[in-house]
Image (cartoon, grey):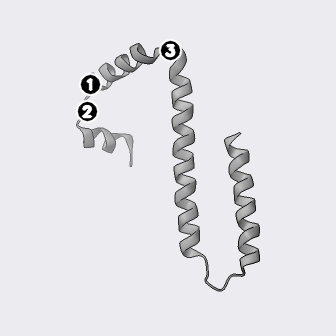
Amino acid sequence: MTLNSILLLFNLGTGEIVLIALVVLLLFGGRKIPELMKGLGKGVRGFKEGLNDVKDEINRPLNEPDELNAKKEAERREQKENRLK
């Protein structure tokens, strides 16, 4: 979904976007906004990783050995932990 399609979905024009940005700036201040965006980015990343895990689980062959699955799962967890640091 592109930014234009999102804006059209909510029917927001340039004036409304500027007004929303000003209100956010007034509420949170200039120093807090980067922290909020960082948290939002981590949340989106975690959500996407969760979706990928579900897709992997659905697409996983039924006859794949459990030991191999446990090893792959441990590697995925390590990668996630390293990304979130």
Q: CA distance from mark 2 to mark 1?
A: 6 Å
Residue at horizontal 74 percent and vertical 53 percent from the top: 78
Question: Label 3 belongs to which residue?
Answer: 30
Nearest to N terminus: mark 2 or mark 3:
2
Residue 57 percent coordinates (x, y): 58, 71
Left or right: 21, with 69 as reference point: left
Residue 65 percent coordinates (x, y): 72, 81
Q: Which mark is residue 12?
A: 2
Identify whether 13 is placed above or below 43.
above
Please tell me how crowded label 1 is: few (under 14), some (14-19), or many (20+) other residues with Cα within 10 Å.
few
Residue 68 percent coordinates (x, y): 75, 75
Identify whether 39 is placed above or below 68.
above
Identify whether 27 is placed above or below 41.
above
Residue 26 position by quadrant = top left
Q: CA distance from mark 3 to mark 1?
A: 20 Å
Question: Label 1 belongs to which residue?
Answer: 16
